[in-house]
Image (spheres, helix red, strand yellow):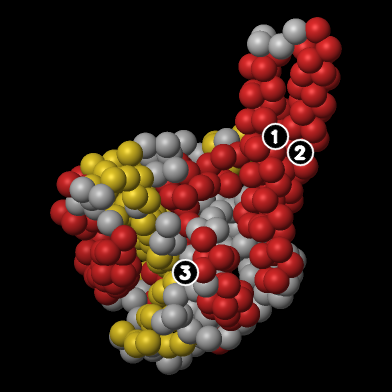
Amino acid sequence: MIDPRILRSEPEALAASLQRRGIELDIDSLIALDVRRRNERVAAEELRAEQKNAGKSISQAQGHERDAAIARAGELSEAYKTALATADALDAEFNEIWASLPNVVDETAADGTEEEDAEELRRWGEPEDGDFLDHLELGEKHGFLDVQRAAKVSGSRFGFILGPLVRLEFALVNYAMDRLEPHGFVPVVPPVLVRDHALFGTGFFPGDRDQVYALADDDLYLVGTSEVSLAAMHADEILDKDDLPLRYAGFSTCFRRESGTYGKDTRGIFRVHQFDKVEMFSFVHPDTARDEHDFLLAREEELVQGLGIPYRVMNIAAGDLGSSAAKKYDIEAWFPGQGRYREITSTSNTTDYQSRRLKIRFRDDDGNRLVYTLNGTAIAVGRWLIALVENYQEPDGTIVIPEALRDYVGFETIG
């Protein structure tokens, strides 16, 4: 969550950030609630102090004075309980609102509230013109993708990945790890079942609860990205400044309900409930966060360029940012089967939004401070597989394996 002090010292900046996101909030009412809850807390503590002093006077009083002191202590005890309950209720009311507020938008994020408002920063590679099969047609032709049987087993938005495409998936994962480790990323296979606090801590709860699969009997949730597990790994810890940046590359299966996308991207495996992903995650000093964001984007571009896939880089509009992101870049690859660019990676600077919730700090000469956290997709396997088979299809229907992946898979073509 964001620092409550911004409400007291820079309410105009908070209001402007929310407005950029397209969120309406009565800032004045929230300020009044914050003042009231803090005043009630002070009043409760004053009653508590008076109650303690009254208790001390009982032992020194006698007769009627003692009876009066006892009665007064009882009155103060009840008054304190009432004031404390009021303060707790006001805190709960304020915290519920405050926890739902998204991060403060970076001033360099693109303006607008829709996906179409993203700002294109640059392009790389030249998309080819012509008639292309899409990934589902290619999958049916070569037998490496079966959504019909997956629907029989699991319902819509699932797929069986078969044969050479499985080898290509593992090749992509190893390709990413081999290129990230030299940059200090530690490979991790994290848990994909997490507790409530991990999703709240990363900003997915309460706002995105409808996107998360829950195991109610166990109070566990399936992650939609290993960002959740990687961020929460250092919850309630104080890191050493000399250990920063801490960088991880997490491989996991991810699960998303895709609530609100009925009828959207239903063909093939572009938008599914289950997919595999390599996710980059960084814990950094606040002063280096913007440089780290550029660094993560550079790693993503390096991976895409290494496979020769045309793409464009987008600066995402403020109103299209996730709750925890102050700024986000997307890479949109060219999908010949769809004839358009589609998102295959994203990288977000979440500043101290997650670390404040998760209580992740670092120790320096000035004491303990909150770290900044950033995340970035290295390989979203399903979408990268689509981009590869569509971009590398030949007129005769065969699919060429990019040179960077041939040593991993052990063959040069599919079909």
Please tell me in which quadrant of the rendered image residue 68 appears.
top right
The location of residue 148, given as percent across then percent down, is 67, 55
In this rendering, the answer to whether 72 lies above or below 338 is: above
Say which residue label 1 marks. 47
Inspect the image, locate mark 3, and give the three-letter code of the amino acid beneath it.
Answer: Ala
Q: Is residue 283 left or right of residue 2?
A: left
Which residue is more in the foreground, 141 or 155?
155
Q: Residue at x 67, y 9 (%)?
A: 59
Say which residue label 2 marks. 83
Upstream in sequence: badge 1 or badge 3: 1
Q: Which corner quadrant holds the N terminus?
A: bottom right
In this rendering, the answer to whether 236 lies above or below 414 is: above
Question: Residue 326, labelled with which disc?
Answer: 3
Q: Residue at x 42, y 57 (%)?
A: 352
Inspect the image, locate mark 1, and give the three-letter code of the amino acid beneath it.
Answer: Leu
Q: Could you give the CA–CA distance between mark 1 and mark 3, rounded to whole angstroms?
A: 42 Å
Disc 1 secondary structure class: helix
Q: Could you give the CA–CA distance between mark 2 and mark 1, rounded to whole angstroms?
A: 8 Å
Q: Is residue 292 left or right of residue 352?
A: left
Q: Nearer the viewer, mark 1 or mark 3?
A: 1
Disc 2 secondary structure class: helix
The location of residue 134, given as percent across then percent down, is 53, 74
Residues marked 2 and 1 touching at CB (< 8 Å): yes
Residue projecting furthest to the bottom = 129
Q: Residue at x 56, y 46 (%)?
A: 199
Q: Residue at x 66, y 65 (%)?
A: 31
